[in-house]
Image (cartoon, grey):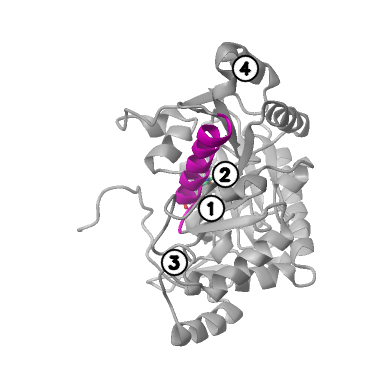
């Protein structure tokens, strides 16, 4: 085994996929409610993706950002047309998109606020990625351990908690002009599927507007229809000044993006770059996802299947009130929350579900996260719920 020991892998070799289903090397079939962790938005081996990408491979796969890339311009145009943003920078992953956002926030502070050592505010229990600045912005100590010293300039408040945010403002009273941005997920994913509270996010929006602070949303997991709206910020009825995307954007192909409103022109040639970022192949994949999302009933299906999932999960809670507490989430980003006092945990349940032919993932030890492909059908959601209930029953 020559791979570094970075993942606690499950004992499954997945070798093939079609739609919402994947097969292991022994031919066993699994319903995939992980979808590459909210990434394979069109499922596996999607007919149109295959056709478009085959064609693209024969046309051109990669050119440097030294040249104009029409596929990149088309994708940026689509993203700008469909969102509050004016400009886009492309990269390859969520962490990289957040790195770009952090750099933009720092340049904003230097140029617009005349600040030498800016501060970015971020939420506790957040997750922004594993590169060093994104890790430093992540409000979970377990990810920091052994990687200190972290990148300086991040301060944390409790998610959805106005008292905590006000207390942080008070603590930073003398340093208020140094605050360049608030970086936050509109719905926390890895931290446990916590949807943002509308009133709290309006407070953040007002604070940012008043103090000329950038409000940056990390929509790496929640963007591109995952929550039943194209962008999760629509649920909150506010607009960020910038937001990041990755995961579902390329339907399983590596692409990330930073989308920015007014201060998009802060970045100048030489400020930021990515060799692979926005290559024709990845952009064509994302354009195919975009076209599918635009098709009739696509978002409606996410909402209907999300409601069906929630209803099924609520039934599981009713059937096992000693073990489960609540369902959190929107659309096809749902979490079934296990009670603290229950001996159940997401890891054991994930393993048991495999025996029932279902792939799930935890969001922390006490949340079972369901993020299937966005194309999932009614009878597949029924299967998902049936298999999940069976695996729970085997453990209790
Ligand atoms: C909200 C959020 N931001 C950033 C990331 C990091 O993305 P990537 O793994 O593509 O670097 C993730 C990954 O789970 C995420 O959920």
Looking at the image, is 48 positioned above or below residue 253? below
SS assignment at label 1: loop
Label 3 sits on a secondary structure element that is: loop
* Magenta stretch encompasses residue 251: no
**Is 103 within the magenta?**
yes
Sequence-first tag of 3 and 2: 3
Q: Would you say the residues marked 1 and 4 are in contact, meaning their CB atoms lie under 8 Å apart?
A: no
Q: Which residue is mark 2?
A: 368
> Can the viewer see residue 315?
no
What residue is disc 3 on?
65
Helix, strand or loop at disc 4? helix
Assign the C terminus to one quadrant of the image.
Answer: top right
Contact (Cβ within 8 Å) of mark 4 with mark 3? no
- Which residue carries the number 4 mark? 169
Q: Which quarter of the figure has residue 130? A: top left
Which of the marked residues, 1 or 3, is nearer the chain's N terminus?
Answer: 3
Cα gap from disc 3 to disc 2, whole angstroms: 40 Å
**Residue with the mark numbered 1:** 360
Q: Is residue 161 above or below residue 192?
A: above
Question: Are there few (<14), some (14-19), or many (20+) residues within 10 Å of tag 4?
Answer: some
Which residues make up the magenta segment? 92-113
Label 4 close to label 2 by CB (< 8 Å) = no
Residue at (70% x, 48% y) in the render = 232
Tag 2 and tag 1, C-beta contact below 8 Å: yes
Mark 1 burial class by Cα count in 10 Å: few <14, some 14-19, many 20+: many
The answer to whether 10 appears left or right of 140 in the picture is left
> Which residue shows up at 42% across the image and 38% down it?
133
């Amino acid at each position: 085994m020559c791979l570094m020991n970075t993942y606690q892998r499950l004992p499954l070799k997945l070798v093939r996929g079609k739609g919402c289903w994947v097969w292991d090397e022994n031919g066993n079939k699994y319903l995939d409610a992980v979808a590459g962790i909210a990434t394979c938005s069109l499922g596996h081996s999607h007919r149109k993706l295959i056709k478009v990408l085959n064609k693209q491979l024969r046309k051109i796969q990669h050119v440097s950002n030294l040249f104009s890339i029409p596929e990149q311009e088309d994708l940026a145009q689509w993203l700008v047309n469909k969102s509050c943003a004016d400009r886009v920078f492309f990269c390859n992953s969520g962490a990289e998109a957040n790195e770009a956002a952090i750099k933009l926030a720092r340049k904003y502070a230097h140029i617009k606020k005349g600040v030498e050592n800016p501060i970015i505010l971020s939420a506790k229990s957040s997750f922004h990625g594993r590169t060093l600045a994104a890790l430093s912005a992540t409000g979970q100590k377990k990810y920091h351990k052994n990687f200190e010293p972290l990148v300086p300039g991040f301060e944390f408040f409790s998610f959805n908690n106005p008292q905590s945010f006000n207390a942080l403002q008070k603590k930073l009273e003398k340093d208020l002009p140094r605050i360049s941005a608030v970086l936050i997920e509109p719905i926390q994913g890895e931290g446990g599927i916590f949807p943002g509270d509308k009133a709290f996010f309006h407070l953040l929006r007002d604070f940012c507007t008043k103090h000329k602070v950038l409000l940056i949303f990390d929509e790496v997991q929640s963007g591109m229809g995952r929550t039943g709206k194209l962008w999760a910020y629509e649920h909150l009825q506010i607009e960020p000044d910038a937001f990041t995307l990755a995961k579902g954007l390329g339907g399983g192909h590596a692409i990330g993006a930073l989308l920015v409103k007014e201060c998009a022109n802060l970045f100048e040639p030489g400020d930021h770059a990515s060799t692979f970022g926005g290559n024709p192949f990845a952009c064509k994949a994302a354009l195919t996802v975009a076209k599918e999302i635009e098709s009739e009933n696509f978002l409606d299906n996410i909402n209907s299947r999300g409601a069906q999932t929630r209803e099924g999960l609520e039934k599981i809670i009713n059937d096992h009130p000693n073990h489960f507490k609540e369902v959190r989430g929107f659309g096809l980003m749902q979490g079934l929350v296990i009670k603290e006092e229950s001996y159940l945990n997401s890891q054991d349940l994930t393993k048991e579900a495999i025996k029932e032919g279902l792939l799930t993932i935890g969001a922390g030890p006490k949340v079972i996260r369901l993020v299937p492909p966005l194309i999932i059908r009614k009878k597949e959601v029924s299967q998902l719920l049936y298999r999940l209930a069976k695996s729970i029953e085997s453990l209790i």
